[in-house]
Amino acid sequence: KDIQFIRSYCYNKLELTRFDSNVGKYVGYTAAGVRQAEIWNKDTSDIAAMNAQRETYCLNNVGNWYRSP
C-alpha cells in the first residue's frame, strides 16, 4: 500500500494530467488537462492497464531500490 505509481503528462514545465494508482484514475490540473482526463477515464482498458503498471513496474523493482544491507 505504500507503493504508488504516478505518470504525469507535462507541457512547457506545467503538469496537465496525472495518473495516480492510489486514486485509480487520471486527474487534470488545468482546463485542458481536466478535459483530457475525462476522455482517458472513459477508457476502462487503459485504466486497468495503468493500474497494472503498479504491480508490473513498481512492486517488481522495489527490491532493486530498497535492499536491506
Image (tube, rainbow, N blue to C red):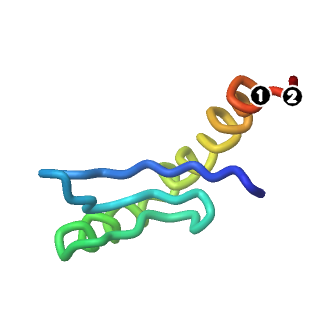
The image quadrant where one finds the C terminus is top right
Q: Residue at x 69, y 50 (%)?
A: 3
Q: Earlier in the sequence, mark 2 or mark 1?
A: 1
Relative to 12, 25 lies left or right: right
* Mark 2 neighbour class, 10 Å CA radius: few under 14, some 14 to 19, many 20 or more: few
> Which mark, by number, is residue 68?
2
Residue 58 placement (x, y as % from top left): 65, 38
Q: Identify the residue under disc 1.
A: 63
Label 1 element class: helix
Tell me: residue 41, above or below residue 4.
below
Which x, y percent locates residue 61?
69, 28
Number of numbered discs visible in the structure rendering: 2
Q: Residue drawn 24% across and 52% down? A: 10
Residue at image position (43%, 63%) is 26
Q: Residue at x 22, y 73 (%)?
A: 30
Residue located farthest toward the front when viewing the structure as drawn? 69
Q: Position of residue 65 (x, y in %)?
A: 68, 29
Left or right for 8, reference 60:
left
Report the amino acid beneath label 1: Gly
Between 51 and 63, the residue placed more toward the observer is: 63
The x, y position of residue 9, in whole percent, is: 30, 51
